Image: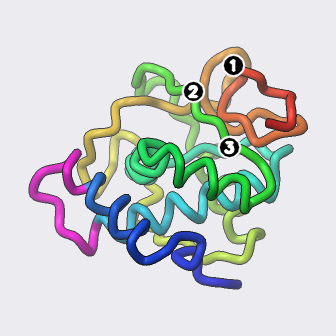
Amino acid sequence: MHGVRALLTPAAFTGVVATVIDNNPGMEKRTAERIVTEALKFVEAAAQFPNDRITPSNVVDEGWHALILHTNLYKKLCANLGRFVHHWPERPDAERHDRRALVHTVTIIERAGHSVDTELWTGPTAPLIPTAAQCSHTPKPGGCGPINPGNCASHCSGGDGGSSQ
């Protein structure tokens, strides 16, 4: 296991953390750091296991959104991980939440060699940390959600879902 924070320079990590804080006024820096760290674990696991359907929690998704907003950094991160991890959001709907998808995601992150910050991997109705991210991720075919099985790590069944980049 390695520390995922090493995937970014300290300055880049600080910049992504600042984006999370900017999008969530009043959030403590340590909380934003935890969120970004979990998002890095998620993206790395998605790149490592592109054929597994995984999905971020709403809280971890906040960190993933912040990473994506740093487009050049995110492009380089994915290139270093060996594949681009796409994100196609879906409008929030707690009815579509599948707890098994989060449990499976945690398992895949652990298979990738990481321990998870369990407090940040709760369902949409029980987040311990409120965040601004307003998209949802579901395992239902045809809807945006977990990583789409195929040749690349693609978030949901939209987009290029089967190409290598």
Give the quarter of the figure containing the C terminus: top right
> Marks 2 and 1: CB-CB under 8 Å?
yes
Determine the residue located farthest toward the top in the rendered image. Answer: 142
Q: What numbered label is drawn on residue 85?
A: 3
Q: Is residue 77 left or right of residue 27?
A: right
Q: Quadrant of residue 21?
A: bottom left
Q: Position of residue 81 (x, y in %)?
A: 74, 60
**How is this picture coloured?**
rainbow
Q: Disc 2 marks which amino acid?
A: Trp
Q: Residue at x 60, y 57 (%)?
A: 42
User: Is the residue marked by circle 1 packed among few (<14), some (14-19), or many (20+) residues within 10 Å?
Assistant: some
Q: Residue tagged by mark 1?
A: 158
- The stretch drawn in magenta includes residue 26: yes
Specify start and end residues of the magenta stretch as a single range.
Answer: 21-31
Please tell me which of labels 1 and 3 falls first in the chain: 3
Q: Quadrant of residue 94?
A: top left
User: Is the residue marked by circle 2 packed among few (<14), some (14-19), or many (20+) residues within 10 Å?
Assistant: some
Q: What numbered label is drawn on residue 88?
A: 2
Give the quarter of the figure containing the N terminus: bottom right
Q: Residue at x 66, y 84 (%)?
A: 2
Front residue of 161/79: it is 79
Q: Position of residue 115 (x, y in %)?
A: 60, 77
User: Is the residue marked by circle 3 packed among few (<14), some (14-19), or many (20+) residues within 10 Å?
Assistant: many
In terms of secondary structure, where does tag 3 sit? loop
Q: Disc 1 marks which amino acid?
A: Gly
In terms of secondary structure, where does tag 1 sit? loop
Q: Residue at x 63, y 55 (%)?
A: 76
Decide: is 32 above or below 90: below
